[in-house]
Image (tube, helix red, strand yellow):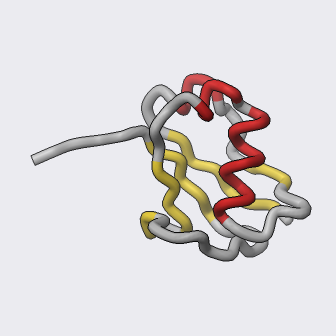
Amino acid sequence: MEIEIITFGKIAEFIHKQQLDCSGIADTDGLKVMLEKAYPALANMKYKLALNRNIVQDNLPIQNLDSVAIMPPFSGG
């Protein structure tokens, strides 16, 4: 299974891939575990995931060709 990865801010400095093979990953919790093992710097950061342009609040299933954004904390007004 392949997903599109979109990164922002400091996260984009160490995750350069735009496509990721997620064989064996069924949901966003599994994706977080895989990403934090592959990119240890991510494990020490606060970040949010967005699945297909929707912020992930709970564990959600991931399907082939989904788009996942990995975003550092942000604020605005």
Q: In x, y percent, where is residue 15?
A: 65, 32
Q: Which of 51/59 is in front?
A: 59
Q: In x, y percent, where is residue 51?
A: 55, 66
Furthest residue to the right? Answer: 23
Instruction: Give the side of residue 76 with respect to residue 36, left or right.
Output: left
Name which residue lies at 89% across and 63% down: 24
Q: Quadrant of the N terminus?
A: bottom right
Instruction: Give the side of residue 31 with respect to residue 50, left or right.
Output: right
Q: Which of 55/30 is in front?
A: 30
Instruction: Give the side of residue 53 with respect to residue 77, left or right.
Output: right
Q: In x, y percent, where is residue 5?
A: 64, 50
The count of marks equals 0
Name which residue lies at 43% across and 31% down: 9
Name which residue lies at 62% across and 25% down: 41
Q: Quadrant of residue 27?
A: bottom right
Relative vertical location of residue 47 with respect to residue 16 in this rendering, above or below: below
Instruction: Give the side of residue 22 with respect to residue 62, left or right.
Output: right
Furthest residue to the left? Answer: 77
Q: Quadrant of residue 37?
A: top right
Relative vertical location of residue 44 with respect to residue 3 in this rendering, above or below: above
Name which residue lies at 46% across and 38% down: 46
